Amino acid sequence: MSLPDVTIAMTTWAPAGEDGYRRSMAVKVTLSSWLRNLHYEGRRRIHIADDGSTLMDYPQMLGHIVEMRGIQTGEPWPLEFSRGERHGVGASLNRAFKAGFDRGDLVLYGVDDWMLPEAFDITPWAAFLEEREDVGMIRFFPHPDLSGHIGMIPGDQVGHYLRLDRHHYAFGHRPALYHRRMIDAYGWFAEDTNAYDCERIYNERFASHGGPDIVLALPHYWRHIGGTEFAGIEPREGRTE
């Protein structure tokens, strides 16, 4: 199957002053880690949705990081910016998602202070999300107290996931891959509110309405080699007496 375009959405804000500077240094580490470790076999681009930062040269710094990574690797990352004026993370998410959906059905929300410390290929998860109309979102990091049922992605690139029950923070603003159907079913994000309330409001919608599910991608550090398989052989078949 042909893979859809993926937009990697970053929402961010850095005020003038020491706090904004410290935050910008964390975002620099985050963005650099994505550029180094996030892999995808289809086309991808980055959308940085800024909420009215006043820290001097902040957007330019982020753009320079993306540009330099492209020069170093010979593989440029298309980059676009949008700007709001202090309407909250929900408004920034809405701008980034709308821009992403203009080009494809998938948006990866990376969160500007969540770095990716090792190589991670989202290709099998994107393919899974394209095929499964009953799933709207794949989370890559959990909240506490979640529960669900384990499933497995078929095919060569095996992955396991937990289909989440609708309680606690089954939905959350942690790194996740969204399909357009998620927004179609549960709506856009609340604007002019803080990040905690924006997350809570969307989670309450998910918990109280039927619609596509959320799954949590499970880590897998062990890999089955395959090949000659002896599991079905009865021990008595190998006896010499």
Image: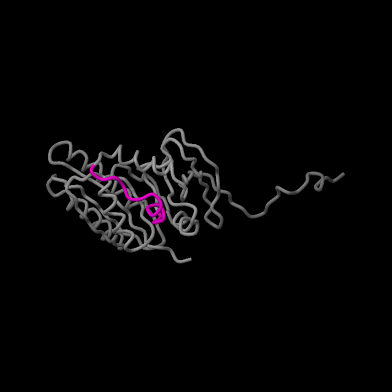
Q: Is 21 located above or below residue 75 in the figure?
A: above
Q: As drawn, is 181 to the left or to the right of 71?
A: right
190 falls in the magenta region = yes
Q: Is 28 located above or below residue 131 in the figure?
A: above
In which quadrant is the C terminus drawn?
top right
Q: Position of residue 19 (x, y in %)?
A: 17, 36
Q: Position of residue 195 (x, y in %)?
A: 28, 40
Furthest toward the front, the residue is: 209
Furthest toward the right, the residue is: 241
**Magenta stretch, residue numbers:** 179-192
Q: As drawn, is 125 to the left or to the right of 174?
A: right
Q: Is 235 located above or below residue 80 in the figure?
A: above
Q: Position of residue 166 (x, y in %)?
A: 47, 40
Between residues 29 and 98, which one lies in front from this camera angle?
Answer: 98
Q: Position of residue 17 (x, y in %)?
A: 12, 38
Residue sitting at 33 percent across and 57 percent down? 7
Give the quarter of the image for residue 112: top left
Residue sitting at 36 percent across and 43 percent down? 202
Between residues 193 and 30, which one lies in front from this camera angle?
Answer: 193
94 falls in the magenta region = no
